[in-house]
Amino acid sequence: MNINATSLDIVLPVLDEERTIESSIRKLVNFSEEFLINFQWKIIVADNGSTDMTPEIVRKLSKEFQNVSYFRLDQKGRGRALKTAWSSSDSDLMSYMDIDLSTDLNIFPKLLQSVKNKDCSIAVGSRLLKSSNVIGRSIKRAFISLCYSFLFRTMFLVSFKDAQCGFKVVSRDVVDQLLPHVEDTGWFFDTELLILAEKTNYLVEEFPVRWVDDPYSSVKIISTAWKDIKGLARMRFGGLGSVKSRLRKSY
């Protein structure tokens, strides 16, 4: 690995993923070794409260692969795991992806290059673009996702469509400037970060992806959607304005 290359953290938030975690990490390591030769990359498994064999499996893999590391939080929450990992990082670029690797990895270098070249500040994999290829997603989940997209775009007049796809790359500046202001510690974390970014003049760019549904996904879509709606209401009625005011004072 080129020690002068752009440094990159690939964070994998996990919760009770003993079924898939080893195969996914091996696949991601192999892909990174072949296609991320221009990056000084490391894979960070951010465990937010697993009670199965996930910790033992990752610790074994971290001994096998020097670029794989692990940390554990006792409290649950994807947003909490990401905020902890990114805020403690000194890398040039930070990213994350869902451990099931539902999103085809072949688009990953394109997202990285876009942020590295400063074409955008946040690169987002999107399932809702016309050229995206979504396989196996139920009609119910697709409908809820479209409704949620319509809701946050109507409320905040933002340009991005898919806030919740677990496949994103962010710049160092976004982490330094915006991450401290993101309040949510769960699934709404992504939406909150993207809205804050676009409303403070950071460019968010979406990329069409090939995405295959994981039939074993543990996401509870109804309760997650309700929490997302409450998060939107918090931002709409005070949260966003307060953050923008604090950011203006810091510049």
Image: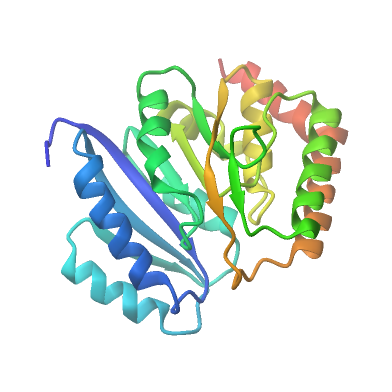
State the image quarter where residue 250 is shown: top right
Quadrant occupied by the N terminus: top left
Is 43 placed left or right of 143 in the picture?
A: left
Q: Residue at x 59, y 33 (%)?
A: 131
Q: Residue at x 46, y 61 (%)?
A: 99
Is 93 placed left or right of 15 in the picture?
A: left
State the image quarter where residue 71 is shown: bottom left
- Residue 189 place in picture, x, y as percent: 64, 47
The colour mode here is rainbow
Q: Residue at x 79, y 23 (%)?
A: 157
The answer to which of 26 and 191 lies nearer the viewer is 26
- Residue 135 place in picture, x, y as percent: 60, 54
Is 144 placed left or right of 98 in the picture?
A: right
Q: Residue at x 19, y 63 (%)?
A: 65
- Residue 214 place in picture, x, y as percent: 57, 65
Is 198 placed left or right of 8 in the picture?
A: right
Q: Residue furthest bottom?
A: 52
Q: Tally the numbered discs.
A: 0
Q: Is residue 196 above or below residue 220?
A: above
